[in-house]
Amino acid sequence: MNMLRKAALGTAFAVLSGTTAIAGCGIGAGNVSIIANDFPAIHAITDAAKACEGDGLTITANMTKEHQTLNAPGMSGTPAEYSVAVVANSSIVALLNDGLVRPLDDLIAKYAPDLPNVNKVSVDGKVMAVAFMANAQHLFYRSDVLEKAGVAVPTTYEEVVAAAEAIRAAGIMEYPVALNTGAGWNLAEEFINMYMGTGGELFETGSAVPTIENENGVAALNMLKRLTEYSNPDFLTFDSNATQALWEAGDTALSVMWGSRGAAVLDNEGSSDEIVSTTVLAAAPTLGGGSTPATTLWWDGFTIASNISDEDAAASFQAMMVGISDEVVKANQDAAVWLSPVYEATPASAGVIASAQGGANPYPMLPYVGLMHSALGDNLAEFLQGSESAEQALADVVAAYTTSAKEQGFLQ
Amino acid sequence: MPHRTFFWFILPSALAMLLFIAFPLVSVILQSLHVEHEQILVTSENCGPFGCKQSTSVDVEATALLKDAAPLGRFNGLGTYFDRGHLATAEISAAWSGTDSWGGFFSKVMNLPFYKALAFTLAYTVVVTPLVILLGLAVALGVNGLPKLLKGPTIFISLLPMIVTPLIGSLILYWMIDADGILGKGLQYIFDDPALSLKASPLLTWLTLFTYGVWHGIPFAFVVFYAGLQTVPEETLEAAMVDGASRWERIRYVVIPYMGPLFVFVALIQLMDNFRVFEPIIGFSAQANASSLSTEIYGDLLGDNAQYASAAATSTLTVIGVAILLTPVLIRTWRDFNRKVV
């Protein structure tokens, strides 16, 4: 499995032969309607796709942060309102569970026969999505602050804690650490990242039975708690915007943030030269002597609706392939970690690539993982505040998850 | 009015009420009695950009057959209402027999999501409603005593907290109480404590949310009371003055009794609104320290697996909660009504 992953990554970041862009579009007639998240890389894709409009081809895009709550209802009708949904490992699950997206094998064979395997997201041998970019949370550090405190660049979370203590002891910063520990989705993601680093599994293989009540779960929680002791006391409100703001204000020196924030942190806006020039993006640290970076790898990709005509599906697929073509990637190198042969790594993508090469696990694409994520988000804050034990917190998570999994039909 | 005329007269509003109030409520209740079908899981090799893995997915075709057979889902009766996410009867009785002190029992109950949410919701309602009524009346009396020229601008400014969208209002306050914000820094300076944060502890978060609730609620009470003040008869007030009543005595014995029905009205609306508290918890990112029945519903519907049954059950319980809260007020109104008829 490790071999496979390395092979896949090698293909992703280095040696691939090109995906052929469809010159001048030449898509033919059809209706393309895209629902997607709202960030620069996706704007680049939809703008390129929209340029193909004309000759009976209409392309519209609804780009919104609420895409996750809109895509399933919008694809349930016949014909579906949206022909394309841009999703990630987590949000594809809701569409797969209800059979709202179609297998793409025929379309790939016809219109993109050279599509590399790294871009194919398949379930039981059927390609259900085309992935185009990668993301992960990883370490951001300030080289000047570490130097001043006299510590080496940490590669394990134990070293991160030691470095934070050194920075505090040297009187440089009182709260040098920040993670996206805001209660809810963000905190749950931090736990899953940390838990993956311990080598733990969230569920029994092949079933929805949770398996987080163990030493690994306790170890992951304890490490989160040790880190938050070096975080500003407001840490239970931290989302990506908050941690980025702290970083750009120079209040933190060791942060774990999304790779997709890298470009915004390293640009010339919102921060001083001193901070930007000493900011380094590195792999996610490991935990407890393990060798797997304690993070999860994410992809963004597009899916095509089931409930639309084959003509519209063909038009949608081709338009999206234009959107992720080599030209678009070349013109937007900074916008994302593209899964494309023409992508050239930038300093902003160093952390994601290093984490992937270190063998980090992908975020699990399981039908019931969203329920676990919600249960984690609701039940870990009290442990971090010190009003509950780690064992009790994990027991609460399992109880909450079990209740909802039964009502959703995943557990009996 | 002849029955026929009455029927045609009432028909449009009765239809609207059926369509917009009764049907949605019935649909929500129906949904709360059903849970999702059993999901048929299959194991297969799934691949992505980061490699292949044996993984589980839903057998869409087999599950679709189940769904077609019974589109509403599996009938669960009141099962959802009594599960751990809601009334948690089994957990409560286990806590009752498993603990020997009130404190231990209480902390076990407060560990259950529904009761945790109910505790905050009730505390918010009980604290904010009377403060809004009192302060709203105080502002109305103050504005009423202003010279004419100042009244207009003062009324406009006093209404601002209500005009601002609740989410935006709470976000603005949230940034102001940040350790780098003007209020946060100011409090740190006043209390001489550089580590003071209104967001970090449950108690301070609750106080912040209560303060926001009062700030946001006052304008409504103020407008209603201010309008009421304009109708207080001058003659009675003057007669009271002739009798030597002080300003306070005039308010206590003339103005307040005269505006009685308005207090009931504001209390009713505020009780309903405050029991459904939602925006400030989201705006203040206070989910770690405070949850309400509405944020519980929101949490169920958010995320990659929407839990309609659970959300519907919490909604129904919220409706029941509002009904219980309003009962005393409604009984009072009913008595007043009957007295007038006699």
Image (tube, rainbow, N blue to C red):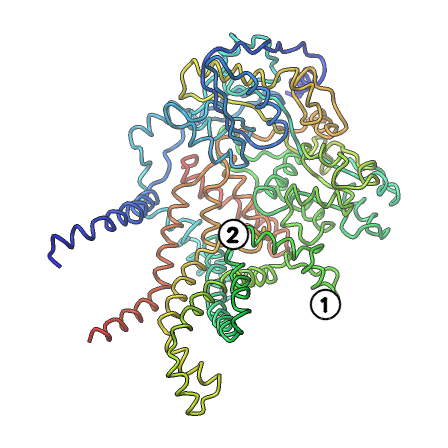
Distance, label 1 to label 2, CA atoms, is: 30 Å
Based on the displayed image, in which of its 4 quarters is residue A150 positioned? top right
The residue nearer to you, when weighing B30 against A307, is A307
Quarter in which the N terminus of chain A is drawn:
top right
Q: Mark 1 falls within which chain?
A: B
Residue A128 tag number: none
The residue nearer to you, when weighing B47 against A30, is A30
Q: Residue sitting at 33 percent across and 36 percent down? A: B73
Q: In the drawing, does residue A407 fall left or right of residue B156? A: left
Three-letter amino acid code at disc 1? Ile
Disc 1 crowd, CA 10 A, few/some/many (<14, 14-19, 20+) = few
SS state under label 1: helix
**Which is more N-terminal, label 2 or label 1?**
2
The residue where tag 1 is placed is: B190
Q: In this view, does B104 lie above or below B309?
A: below
SS state under label 2: loop
Counting from the top left corner in percent of width and height, residue A179 is at 68, 43
Do the residues indicated by labels 1 and 2 lie within the same chain of the protein? Answer: yes
The residue where tag 2 is placed is: B165
Counting from the top left corner in percent of width and height, residue B245 is at 45, 89
Q: Mark 2 falls within which chain?
A: B
Q: In this view, does A152 lie above or below A233?
A: above
